[in-house]
Image: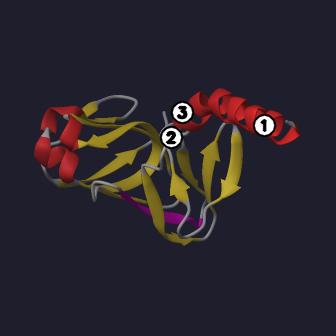
Amino acid sequence: MKGRSYSLVAITFLIAAAPALAQQESPAGRIKVVSGTAYVVRSGGEVRAEVGQSVFVSDSLRTGDDGRIGVTFDDDTRLSLGPNSEVRLNEFRYAPAQGSVGLAMQFLRGVAMYVSGQIAKLAPDSVRLETPSAIVGVRGTSLAIQVVPE
């Protein structure tokens, strides 16, 4: 009887934990290149950026005076940041089989290079690149953005 009670406790724990496990989000992309001072800002804390590190929705990427960082997202969108730059990933959905695609980034400061991936090819209107003074519509292209603080 003792073995059954342990099994019942384990099953109850797994059932209770299932919603929390299901809510863990998957990465939107990975850092491919990093040099100098570069950070991933997540949940209010800074973590030194490293090659291979995952990038999630709500993460910000920040570089210092000597920093550079390059990210490839799951849909093959590429983003590169130069020195003294910051970008926040507000949305990333790439589930084309379910008809769910979308990308939104907020460019806060510095210089960035953006190269469109599959999301822009499948649904160009679902890509939104925001700066403090403009919103850029993407139609399957590459572009450079410079945000100068006021």
What residue is pinned by disc 3? Answer: 23
The boundaries of the magenta stretch are 66-73
Q: With respect to residue 31, does 131 lie above or below? A: above
Discs 2/1, front: 1
Say which amino acid is labelled 3. Answer: Gln
Quadrant location of residue 102?
top left
What residue is pinned by disc 2? Answer: 25
Color style of the picture: secondary structure
Which of these two is toward me, 34 or 134? 34
Q: With respect to residue 97, does 13 lie above or below? A: above
Which of these two is toward me, 123 or 109? 123
Discs 3/1, front: 1
**Mark sitting earlier along the chain (2/1):** 1
Say which amino acid is labelled 1. Answer: Arg
In this rendering, would 9 be left or right of 22? right
Looking at the rendered image, the quarter that the N terminus falls into is top right
The answer to whether residue 117 is seen in the rendering is yes
Q: Secondary structure at mark 1?
A: helix
